[in-house]
Image: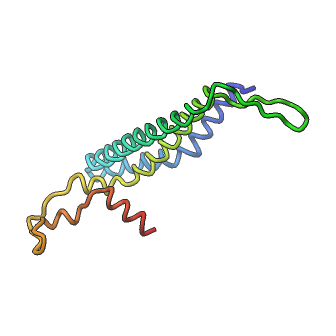
Amino acid sequence: MFRPTRVIALVIFALVFLAGPAMVRFYTDWLWFGEVGYPQIFSTMLRGQSLLFTIAFLAAFAWMAVNLRVALASIGDVRPVFTTREGLEIALPGRRQLRTIAMAVAAVLGVLVGLLTSGRWELWLAWRNAVPFGVADPILGYDVGSTCSRSPSSSCSRASARR
Protein backbone atom coordinates (compact mmCIF):
# COMPACT_ATOMS: atom_id res chain seq x y z
CA MET A 1 0.00 0.00 0.00
CA PHE A 2 0.95 3.64 -0.36
CA ARG A 3 2.39 5.36 2.64
CA PRO A 4 1.76 9.09 3.09
CA THR A 5 5.48 9.77 3.49
CA ARG A 6 6.25 8.15 0.14
CA VAL A 7 3.53 10.14 -1.60
CA ILE A 8 4.77 13.38 -0.03
CA ALA A 9 8.35 12.54 -1.02
CA LEU A 10 7.24 11.81 -4.59
CA VAL A 11 5.36 15.11 -4.80
CA ILE A 12 8.37 17.04 -3.47
CA PHE A 13 10.64 15.22 -5.94
CA ALA A 14 8.30 16.09 -8.82
CA LEU A 15 8.11 19.74 -7.75
CA VAL A 16 11.87 20.12 -7.41
CA PHE A 17 12.94 18.35 -10.58
CA LEU A 18 10.02 19.00 -12.92
CA ALA A 19 8.64 22.38 -11.85
CA GLY A 20 11.86 23.72 -10.32
CA PRO A 21 13.49 24.96 -13.53
CA ALA A 22 10.27 26.69 -14.61
CA MET A 23 9.93 28.37 -11.21
CA VAL A 24 13.55 29.56 -11.35
CA ARG A 25 13.02 31.01 -14.84
CA PHE A 26 9.81 32.72 -13.71
CA TYR A 27 11.54 34.22 -10.69
CA THR A 28 14.54 35.49 -12.65
CA ASP A 29 12.28 37.02 -15.32
CA TRP A 30 10.20 38.70 -12.62
CA LEU A 31 13.33 40.14 -11.00
CA TRP A 32 14.79 41.27 -14.34
CA PHE A 33 11.64 43.01 -15.58
CA GLY A 34 11.30 44.72 -12.19
CA GLU A 35 14.95 45.81 -12.23
CA VAL A 36 14.79 47.39 -15.68
CA GLY A 37 11.55 49.17 -14.80
CA TYR A 38 9.06 47.26 -16.95
CA PRO A 39 6.99 45.07 -14.61
CA GLN A 40 3.85 45.88 -16.66
CA ILE A 41 5.37 44.09 -19.66
CA PHE A 42 5.96 41.01 -17.53
CA SER A 43 2.38 41.11 -16.28
CA THR A 44 1.10 41.53 -19.86
CA MET A 45 3.09 38.47 -20.87
CA LEU A 46 1.69 36.47 -17.95
CA ARG A 47 -1.88 37.57 -18.68
CA GLY A 48 -1.51 36.60 -22.33
CA GLN A 49 -0.07 33.20 -21.48
CA SER A 50 -2.66 32.45 -18.82
CA LEU A 51 -5.56 33.58 -21.01
CA LEU A 52 -4.39 31.44 -23.93
CA PHE A 53 -3.81 28.46 -21.64
CA THR A 54 -7.25 28.79 -20.07
CA ILE A 55 -9.10 29.14 -23.37
CA ALA A 56 -7.20 26.27 -25.02
CA PHE A 57 -7.52 24.01 -21.98
CA LEU A 58 -11.27 24.57 -21.66
CA ALA A 59 -11.88 24.09 -25.38
CA ALA A 60 -9.74 20.94 -25.62
CA PHE A 61 -11.09 19.44 -22.40
CA ALA A 62 -14.72 20.12 -23.37
CA TRP A 63 -14.22 18.68 -26.85
CA MET A 64 -12.45 15.57 -25.59
CA ALA A 65 -14.87 15.05 -22.68
CA VAL A 66 -17.95 15.29 -24.89
CA ASN A 67 -16.51 12.95 -27.52
CA LEU A 68 -15.31 10.40 -24.98
CA ARG A 69 -18.66 10.45 -23.17
CA VAL A 70 -20.47 9.85 -26.46
CA ALA A 71 -18.10 6.99 -27.25
CA LEU A 72 -18.57 5.48 -23.78
CA ALA A 73 -22.34 5.78 -24.01
CA SER A 74 -22.30 3.00 -26.60
CA ILE A 75 -20.79 0.59 -24.08
CA GLY A 76 -23.39 -1.41 -22.24
CA ASP A 77 -23.60 -1.81 -18.49
CA VAL A 78 -22.05 -5.27 -18.74
CA ARG A 79 -18.60 -5.46 -17.21
CA PRO A 80 -16.34 -7.51 -19.52
CA VAL A 81 -14.33 -10.38 -18.09
CA PHE A 82 -10.91 -11.46 -19.39
CA THR A 83 -10.06 -15.15 -18.96
CA THR A 84 -6.42 -16.21 -18.95
CA ARG A 85 -5.10 -19.52 -20.28
CA GLU A 86 -5.01 -20.84 -16.76
CA GLY A 87 -8.72 -20.10 -16.36
CA LEU A 88 -8.26 -17.09 -14.09
CA GLU A 89 -11.03 -14.54 -14.67
CA ILE A 90 -10.16 -10.84 -14.43
CA ALA A 91 -12.94 -8.27 -14.46
CA LEU A 92 -12.10 -5.36 -16.76
CA PRO A 93 -13.19 -1.80 -16.01
CA GLY A 94 -16.84 -1.06 -16.53
CA ARG A 95 -18.48 2.05 -17.92
CA ARG A 96 -18.16 4.06 -14.69
CA GLN A 97 -14.44 3.33 -14.32
CA LEU A 98 -13.82 4.02 -18.01
CA ARG A 99 -15.64 7.35 -17.68
CA THR A 100 -13.32 8.35 -14.83
CA ILE A 101 -10.26 7.31 -16.85
CA ALA A 102 -11.58 9.15 -19.92
CA MET A 103 -12.07 12.40 -17.96
CA ALA A 104 -8.53 12.12 -16.60
CA VAL A 105 -7.18 11.57 -20.12
CA ALA A 106 -9.21 14.55 -21.38
CA ALA A 107 -7.79 16.71 -18.57
CA VAL A 108 -4.19 15.67 -19.29
CA LEU A 109 -4.62 16.28 -23.02
CA GLY A 110 -6.28 19.62 -22.25
CA VAL A 111 -3.28 20.65 -20.15
CA LEU A 112 -0.90 19.64 -22.97
CA VAL A 113 -2.90 21.59 -25.55
CA GLY A 114 -3.05 24.57 -23.17
CA LEU A 115 0.71 24.52 -22.64
CA LEU A 116 1.35 24.26 -26.36
CA THR A 117 -1.01 27.14 -27.09
CA SER A 118 0.27 29.38 -24.30
CA GLY A 119 3.70 29.23 -25.93
CA ARG A 120 2.30 31.27 -28.83
CA TRP A 121 1.54 34.30 -26.60
CA GLU A 122 3.72 36.70 -28.63
CA LEU A 123 1.80 36.02 -31.83
CA TRP A 124 -1.53 36.44 -30.05
CA LEU A 125 -0.51 39.71 -28.37
CA ALA A 126 0.82 41.09 -31.67
CA TRP A 127 -2.51 40.33 -33.33
CA ARG A 128 -4.59 41.56 -30.39
CA ASN A 129 -2.76 44.89 -30.12
CA ALA A 130 -2.33 45.54 -33.84
CA VAL A 131 -2.71 49.15 -35.00
CA PRO A 132 -3.22 50.50 -38.52
CA PHE A 133 -0.15 51.86 -40.29
CA GLY A 134 -2.06 54.64 -42.04
CA VAL A 135 -0.80 53.55 -45.46
CA ALA A 136 -3.17 51.94 -47.95
CA ASP A 137 -2.21 49.01 -50.14
CA PRO A 138 -2.11 50.35 -53.74
CA ILE A 139 -3.83 47.31 -55.24
CA LEU A 140 -6.52 46.28 -52.73
CA GLY A 141 -6.87 49.52 -50.81
CA TYR A 142 -6.58 47.82 -47.39
CA ASP A 143 -4.37 49.19 -44.65
CA VAL A 144 -0.88 47.70 -44.80
CA GLY A 145 -1.06 46.88 -41.07
CA SER A 146 -3.80 44.32 -41.72
CA THR A 147 -1.40 42.15 -43.71
CA CYS A 148 1.39 42.48 -41.13
CA SER A 149 -0.72 41.25 -38.23
CA ARG A 150 -2.87 38.42 -39.46
CA SER A 151 -5.05 36.35 -37.18
CA PRO A 152 -3.13 33.94 -34.93
CA SER A 153 -4.96 30.90 -36.29
CA SER A 154 -3.89 31.54 -39.88
CA SER A 155 -0.30 32.27 -38.83
CA CYS A 156 -0.14 29.14 -36.66
CA SER A 157 -1.53 26.96 -39.43
CA ARG A 158 1.00 28.37 -41.91
CA ALA A 159 3.86 27.81 -39.44
CA SER A 160 2.71 24.24 -38.80
CA ALA A 161 2.47 23.54 -42.53
CA ARG A 162 6.09 24.67 -43.06
CA ARG A 163 7.50 22.22 -40.48
Question: Residue 19, position in %: x, y?
Answer: 53, 44
- Residue depicted at x 65% and y 36%: 10
The foreground one among 63 and 5 is 63
Q: Is residue 130 left or right of residue 1?
A: left
The foreground one among 153 and 130 is 153
Residue 127, by quadrant, is bottom left
Looking at the picture, does residue 104 appear above or below residue 35?
above
Looking at the picture, does residue 97 appear above or below residue 63?
above
- Residue depicted at x 33% and y 61%: 155
Question: Residue 133, position in %: x, y?
Answer: 12, 64
The foreground one among 85 and 27 is 85
Q: Is residue 69 left or right of residue 152?
A: right
- Residue depicted at x 91% and y 35%: 86
Looking at the picture, does residue 148 appear above or below residue 4?
below
- Residue depicted at x 27% and y 57%: 151
Q: Is residue 59 left or right of residue 34?
A: right
Question: Residue 129, position in %: x, y?
Answer: 21, 53
Residue 54, by quadrant, is top left
Q: Is residue 146 left or right of residue 115?
A: left
Residue most toward the bottom? 138
How many numbered marks appear? 0
Q: How is the image coloured?
A: rainbow
Q: Quadrant of the N terminus?
A: top right
The foreground one among 8 and 100 is 100
